[in-house]
Amino acid sequence: MTSDPSGTVALAFSGGLDTTVCVPLIKEEYGYDDVIGVTVDVGQPAKEFDEAEETAEELGLEHYVVDAKEEFAELCLQSVKANGTYQGYPLGTALARPVIANAILEVAEEQGCSALAHGCTGKGNDQLRFEAVWRASDLDVLAPVRELGLTREWESEYAAEKGLPVEGGDGGRWSIDTNLWSRSVEGSELEDPAYVPGEEIYDWTTAPGSAETETLELTFEQGVPVALDGEEIGAVELIEQLNETAGKHGVGRSDIMEDRMLGLKVRENYEHPAATVLLNAHEALESLVLTQEERAFKQQVDQRWAQKGYEGLVDAPLTKALEGFIEQTQTKVTGTVTVKLDGGQARPVGRDSEYAVYSESAASFNEEAVTDDIEQDDATGVAKYHGFQSRLANRVAENVAAKQAEAATDGGGDAADTDE
């Protein structure tokens, strides 16, 4: 923050309690002249934009809405190329934050703002993801909730005193974040790791087993899904359609203990039907077209990419370098995958590609030879060598142990004779 703040602040605005109280606090506690609100569309429900618009109007807040669904969808599909999961669940909120932050920064620069602000606390990941983008600019960065040490109870009382347009603090029993790729649910009883949630926490998915088994076919070109059941489809439409279709089968539920960047361990519940289908299908196609060495090394690259994605550092030099390797592998990830949706699972049951590193005759038990110049008996020499060093090491260790035991026994006998 500058020593003599002035001008306008662009606030990441949702219309919830945190961002609503930030509007007057930025003027009262920081001394800025004005605040504008920016809401970025990455696939949230329409009602969230209605609520944000209504709240902004009641606050007299100049409000901007930016449509970033296409940009976010492209980043989601980039994460598919990298098999992007963190501690077992598809990255969603983490990927949305840098997209949102960049969109807000663009509005701030267009409107001549002198600072940017968010309503994140000092305990979560989002403060870091927003500020990783914003601190690359020349604008000041404000975090009123974190910097003023606000609690939800204080915010509710402050809102009541000021007559701010908020309903019941956080507006519901759960803290929910929704975007095109995932829906997260936390808070209330879910903060207890032993609490078993009911179906009421879910919105995108129905109870597994409540729908008839269904299959679908996905077509990939260089790692990117481009068609569903033979029909070309755009990224946003594909994700939305798969969320609906796979959600009916209960696909894409995660209940995990997540390690945040600051070291806090939290209980998170997620829904991600489309992400689950696409990630499973993509990995199945990779298993067909990549060599064993490529697959093994790519697992390391993917894990590192996912870590950077979780941190919100999708534009970091390391991330781009990792993507160089990923893109090279994806030149062969072209083909189709058939996925069966049933009982909460999205299971690849068929895959086909002209790049398949696979020979049916070589692998078949019904063929005598492997290839024209390789016979089954040629594996005898390989079998003899396989494990040779391990067997030798174990034998040497056994011999040494036997000699040491013998020496100890002999030494013990000499000592007894001396005593006599």
Image (cartoon, grey):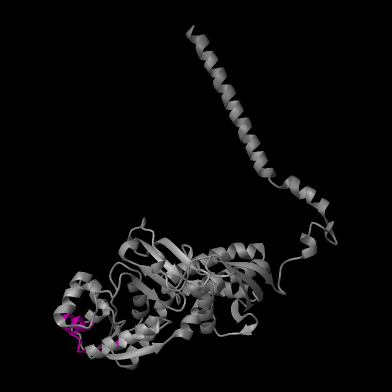
Which residue is pictured at 28% across the width and 77% down the height?
119
Residue pushed farthest left? Answer: 161
Is residue 54 in view from this perspective? yes
Which residue is pictured at 30% across the width and 66% down the height?
123
Is residue 321 in view from this perspective? no
Q: Which image quadrant is residue 45 in?
A: bottom left
Relative placement, left or right, of 363 versus 27 is: right
Q: Which image quadrant is residue 168 in?
A: bottom left
Measured as percent of width and height from the top left, residue 231 is found at 63, 84
Which residue is pictured at 49% across the width and 79% down the height?
75
Between residue 229 and residue 299, name the one nearer to us: 229
The magenta segment = 22-37
Measured as percent of width and height from the top left, residue 92 is found at 44, 73
Question: Is residue 33 located in the magenta-colored stretch of the structure?
Answer: yes
Above or below for 142 versus 7: above
Between residue 407 and residue 85, name the one nearer to us: 85
Relative placement, left or right, of 108 versus 76 is: left
Between residue 377 and residue 77, name the one nearer to us: 77
Measured as percent of width and height from the top left, residue 68 is found at 43, 86
Question: Is residue 253 located in the magenta-colored stretch of the structure?
Answer: no
Relative placement, left or right, of 299 versus 126 is: right
The quarter of the rendered structure image containing the N terminus is bottom left
Q: Which image quadrant is residue 403 in?
A: top right
Above or below for 172 versus 293: below
